[in-house]
Amino acid sequence: MKRLRMEIYGAVQGVGFRPFVYRLADSFDITGWVCNAAAGVILEVEGEEAVLRRFGEAVEKEKPALSIIQDVTREYLDPVGYTGFEIRTSTGGERRVLVLPDISTCDDCLEEIMDPENRRYRYPFTNCTNCGPRYSIINSIPYDRPATTMSGFHMCRKCLSEYEDPSNRRFHAQPNACPECGPHIELLDRNGKILAERDEALRRTASAILDGKIVAVKGLGGFHLIALASSDKVVQLLRKRKGRKTKPFALMFPSSDMISSFCEVSEMEKNLLKSPESPIVLLRKRIDHGSSNKLSGYISPGNPDLGVMLPYTPLHHLLLQEIGDPVVATSGNLSDEPICTDEKEALRRLSGLADLFLIHNRPIARHVDDSIVRVVDGREMVLRRARGYAPLPVRMNKKSDVILATGAHLKNTLALSIGNNVFVSQHIGDMETPQAVKAYKEVWSSIELLYHAKPKKIIHDMHPDYISTKYAVESGLPAFPVQHHVAHVCSCMLDNELSPPLLGVSWDGTGYGTDGTIWGGEFFKIGEEFIERVAHMRVFRLPGGEKAVREPRRSALGLLSEIFDDPDRYIPSDVFMKEELTVLKRMLKNNLNSPYSSSMGRLFDVVSSMLGLCQTNEFEGQAAMLLEYAAAGVETDDSYNLLLDRSEGKPWILDWESLINDIIEDITIGEKASMISARFHNALAEGIVSVAELMGEKEVVLSGGCFQNVYLAERTANMLRRKGFTPVLHWKIPPNDGGIAPGQIFAAVNLYKNE
């Protein structure tokens, strides 16, 4: 007889791990106990040694589907005489356990809420150990009910019986509740007056949406603004109230079959829609669907894609069942602000946007947006990492001290490293408003408290004016900068568990360069503890600096001024007022507030402006997106000339001058914008291959916001493969600035660790 002690680390709380161990021990007829600890799950079992070995193997092989085991320790000891098996009270200690993301409603719970004979029929907060809220309700770990926002709801006799029954799937399900003892919903008007409660509130909400009302709905990690997607009038009203002219709205559909009638859906995309993460998935619109009257053209104007998701909580399932049609489900916020999580805050901030408010009384511990993914080059690519993904860590090959990375200015996330784990926060957003800065500070505090970890140093962007840089420098801890585009490449290396040597391509909008210029079209050779900028796009000036980021027409004027004395003749004639053009030309001539940039994102802006697609960005990347969409459906290997040049001892330069002249010639002869866009994209892919052939590294990492562009990413990857290279794209960490924070940590640990 022996006693086996196992300590199991990973995502092992909130997934039914202790009930699983309980039932497994019973099947092996062995005695002992199991409990949650701050580090994970600890168990001891007694029996014959051969039986204990088989039991230990079964724990790892048969673990709950949602659990993630990172590490297991085993120790065989002398028996102490356990007489039964029990789930013990949780213990403290070092915090190593992984907090699980929020999980979409499982089929069993969905069946219950649709069954009139079930006591949870139409109950919007039904959950079990296989689904429901996790990260959005956890205040601290170990993951027990008193440490969640469910602590104020005391289980009724029936719920407690389920909670204590090892054979029940709600055995130790911490958010367990029912209509008798759990949270409930209320429908409010703009003044906070209660109009209806419980199921009546849900039915009246559905009726109001069908009648054309915009309703702010408190969901899992914050509020959605929900409106009928078939009404032009309603969608235009929502755009007007939100100040959102053309940026696409996300949609929620009642079923995957209905999505298939509007969108082209591959098997992988269908699996993503139905996954436990249940993200927004970017899908191509079907041209041949026969239900055009059920979807307004103002949902995503000028965009061949739709961002769609399925209901992921019982509340959403019930609401969409009542409505029966797709709805707009956009974040409950004002432009550049984080989503609202509290009903009082929502009544104050959203009263000008929503007609009604469907709220509930389960507090939200932290805001969590919907995640966004798309399929690129045959696999999932996360573009916004939040619900369903955060705060699960990414594993690093090397252990590190506790390090906090403060991320970028746009699409901000934070990252915290502990040992081999890099914990990436949920999407925070653009640091443009006081509300966003407040949310940023709250997430910073929350991620430290959750893991009881005090950073020993802070890593930040090189840009001195970023708010994230300011807070890092003012933290009182040793603070170290990592260049923006280096962080992009490193985030992709972390995402794919890569080690040097390799070639990193970092293409995005803008980032502060080490030479004082604005970078964004960079190539880096990465070796063991060194990184070298080996090539970049030819620089051009941005008249007005930040204004040029928002106005592609300015970038076009700046680049064309490098080639021509009369640059405005190659831009559509109605783009500038005469006086405005005079001022901008003077700025360029005298080099006033016109910084040089090697940005690939700005080059996209230039071509988009020249083609008349976009002169002013309503949202980040709009001009580049429109240029990508222009090439949709075009199949050609034609491309423009993008030449490589080099001065003695300096990095190689990808020179766009010949490319721009080719585009001007095509515009002059009346070539279609679709063909010009395709040739432009093809030239960029060929440029990457040319640099790769010069550098000779087999692995080529493709990072930065430009590689959210499916045409560019897939064209480049395929060309690299044909030439014998291994292209590497992002998948769980976003290629955009949402991936900067984990990349900063990887760079600090692997490239600059001696600093």
Image (cartoon, rainbow, N blue to C red):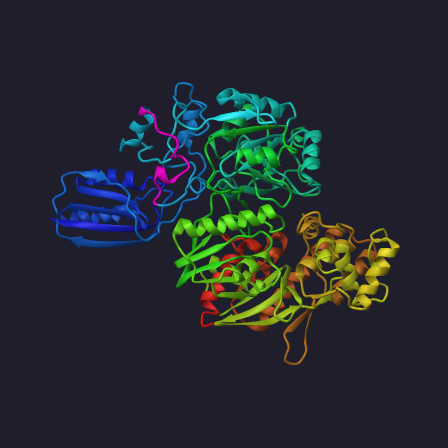
Residue 458 horizontal side relative to residue 677, left or right: left
Outermost right residue:
578
Q: Nearer the viewer, residue 423 or 732?
A: 423
Residue 648 horizontal side relative to residue 135, left or right: right
Outermost bottom residue:
648
Q: In this view, does 216 lie above or below 502?
A: above
For the magenta stretch, what is the residue range? 142-157
Can residue 727 be seen here? The reply is no
Question: x and y percent of residue 391 in the render?
Answer: 45, 48
Q: Residue at x 23, y 49 (%)?
A: 56
Residue 137 location, quadrant: top left
Q: Residue at x 26, y 33 (%)?
A: 166
Residue 31 location, quadrant: top left
Question: x and y percent of residue 578 in the render?
Answer: 88, 55
Count of marks placed on residues: 0
Can residue 712 be seen here? The reply is yes
Question: x and y percent of residue 150 in the render?
Answer: 40, 34
Residue 144 magenta-drawn? yes
Q: Is residue 150 above or below residue 729?
A: above
Q: Which of 707 and 602 is in front in this view?
A: 602
Q: In this view, does 271 lie above or below 579?
A: above
Question: x and y percent of residue 532 in the render?
Answer: 56, 72
Residue 317 magenta-drawn? no
Most frequent secondary structure within the magenta stretch: loop
